[in-house]
Image (cartoon, rainbow, N blue to C red):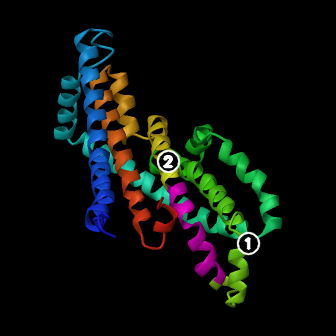
Amino acid sequence: MQGQVIPDKGAAGMVPAARGGRRAAAGAALPGTTIAGALALWVLLTRLHVFPEYAFPSLSATIQALGEEFRAGRLTSDITASLFRVAVGFVLAAILGVPLGLWLGQRLTPRLSLQPLVNFFRCLSPLAWIPFAILWFGIGDKPAIFLIFMASFFPLTLATMAAVANVPAVYYRVARDYGFHGPELLTRVVFPAVLPQVITALRVTAGIAWVVVVAAEMVGCQDGLGYGIYDARNGQRLDIVAAYMLVIGLLGVGIDRLLAQLTRLPNVRWGYDR
């Protein structure tokens, strides 16, 4: 019709792209702004002497202590020790906990029988095991690895079990129509269906494991980031304590970001796209 305005499809298509670009830019800028604000608040609190200097080290003193510990080699050694303990304990928990959760989720009788026990140990603080861990394994890597395993195994088992138990029944009906049974049903239907939930459980549990290793190293080890904080506290070097706290937080975020890369796998993107 004469006078009718024909919409510009190219321009219309650019609107979602422009919005997506702005959203990505905001997603990159907002965390940096928040971190800058937190650092500025830290500096402001020390300048105003809200807390005594010996009880609240400044940002500059913390950075200086960080450099001292790094140059002395203590920080590198402690990071290596803590990462090793977390890796061993967490991987052992994942290797044993995820398959157990898959098995329990598909079998009603064992699930009803073992779920209360798994839930009990999940709710039990892993730090309560410290006296037993020291008596059983002594001082060093073994008690810390044991505590990390106890902190990770039961949450992973329970999360995987719940995810499998909640797989829609229609998945199993379709699987039967295609003739999937036994291991093929597990590998081609059940595990792909619960993989996004399992990855989320891995990320959450890795954070728990990282917290536990710091606490465990304060009493059962003679190295590691937790021991570094304990030793600095005894020496009344709160600048070193703050430096180690920064390192612990940054490494924890790094571990989570590393596991978050699993969500980019083609087979699990469907569970995260919104």
Q: Chief secondary structure of the magenta span?
A: helix
Q: Is residue 238 magenta?
A: no
Q: Position of residue 103 (x, y in %)?
A: 69, 70
Above or below residue 235? Residue 141 is: below
Magenta highlight range: 185-202
Identify the disc placed on residue 115: none
Q: Is residue 198 magenta?
A: yes
Q: Nearer the viewer, mark 2 or mark 1?
A: 1
Note whether residue 243 is visible.
yes
Q: Position of residue 193 (x, y in %)?
A: 59, 70
Please name the residue shown 43% across and 52% down the image.
Answer: 85
Please name the residue shown 34% across and 46% down the image.
Answer: 251
Identify the disc placed on residue 209: 2
Badge 2: residue crowd in 10 Å (few <14, some 14–19, many ≥20) = many
Q: Position of residue 81 (x, y in %)?
A: 36, 49
Q: Is residue 186 left or right of residue 225?
A: right
Q: Amino acid at mark 2?
A: Ala
Note whether residue 240 is visible.
no
Please name the residue shown 70% across and 63% down the image.
Answer: 166
Q: Which residue is mark 1?
A: 169
Q: Quadrant of residue 53?
A: top left
Above or below residue 219? Residue 209 is: below
The residue closer to the viewer here, 194 or 217, is 194
Q: Position of residue 62 (x, y in %)?
A: 23, 27
Q: Name the element at disc 2.
A: helix
Instruction: Give the mark, 2 or 1, whose residue is nearer the N terminus.
Output: 1
